[in-house]
Amino acid sequence: MVKVVRVAAYGGPEVLKFEDVVLAPPGPNEVRVQHKAIGLNYIDTYFRSGLYPAPVMPFTPGQEAAGVVTAVGSAVKGVKVGDHVGYVGSLGAYAEERNVPAAVLMKLPKTVKFETAAAIMLKGLTAEYLLFRTFKVKKGHVVLIHAAAGGTGSLLVQWARSLGATVIGTAGSPEKVKLAKKHGCHHVIDYSKEDFPARVKEITKGALCDVVYDGVGKSTFPASLDCIKPFGMFVSFGNASGAVEAFDLGLLSKKGSLYTTRPTLVTHVANPKTFAAMAKRLFGAVADGTLKIAAPTKMPLAKVAEAHVALQGRQTTGSTVFIP
């Protein structure tokens, strides 16, 4: 028997139930992983609430974890018992132990701890595709990063600055403004007090931004479009304040022939070669100090509902991991 978190009906944090289940042996192409750390991400709340439908009901939430291989399926190659591995994008991580498709696993470098891997894989790979594949940030670009004190935001800030961009961040409190500055923002706007499009115009002397990275959603749209120069890009990758509703595409022409996109990590890592290249770049950036990873907040998996309340209440900074 293993402890897992189960959701039998969509709803608030109260639907997260801690249960005992029997874990079957891994299938031919699966690997059993004993989790040492499990990542908490906003996408977990989307599945819990039903914004993103789960493939089956009931289901176990969670998109990333790191741990030790304890068994391998008959057709699995390149992975053995005792390997330290991590994975991302495979629903079901909120568990002490589980069977994972071998195709989604990545071996962890010896220098990367379980807690660090669980804290950065989803957020770090998201930052990788946003900066290197969605809009390729170069020296001289001006970028606006919403929620710059958050887990993904902090990685975006550090990486974008290392690429030579001028980084403008937004945050929702004086404490988070200080944290965003610490991460490396050249300018930080407290959008709980300031009109962020007006401040962007002031900071850039009217030139505006090449790209806006927005993981906040409803509360920052469509104002984000007023921060972008002609032919620039609006990149929506999260819904922390609620999903962006349908809008008139004519807005993009009125604001200056803008581009907009809503990419996902799942489609990027579906290609094994792309996945491997993304992971190599991420772990390389951690190893060479480009990305400085703060120690994540640790919580017992049994307090999963409490963690969801804090996350959705914008009470967290950086990353949180569950320890089974």
Image (cartoon, grey):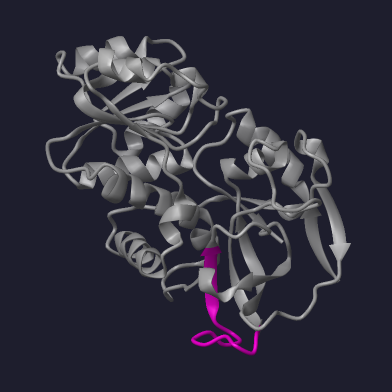
Q: Tell me, yes or no, whether the highlighted magenta stretch contains residue 85.
A: yes
Compared with residue 260, is residue 116 higher up or lower down, i.e. above or below? below
One can see residue 306 in this view? yes
Please tell me whether the stretch drawn in magenta is mainly helix, strand or loop. loop
Compared with residue 174, is residue 13 higher up or lower down, i.e. above or below? below
Quarter holding residue 68 = bottom right
Q: Is residue 197 left or right of residue 220?
A: left
Q: Is residue 139 left or right of residue 143?
A: left
Q: Position of residue 171 (x, y in %)?
A: 43, 25
Q: Tell me, yes or no, whether the highlighted magenta stretch contains residue 283.
A: no
Q: Is residue 196 left or right of residue 90?
A: left
Residue at the image position 65 percent from the left and 83 percent from the top: 28
Q: Position of residue 18 (x, y in %)?
A: 83, 53
Q: Position of residue 151 (x, y in %)?
A: 47, 43
Closest to the observer: 149 or 42?
Answer: 42
Residue at the image position 14 percent from the left and 14 percent from the top: 205
One can see residue 294 in this view? no
Q: Position of residue 198 (x, y in %)?
A: 29, 9
Which quarter of the figure is the N terminus placed in?
bottom right
Compared with residue 248, is residue 155 higher up or lower down, i.e. above or below? below
Which residues fall within the magenta stretch? 72-87
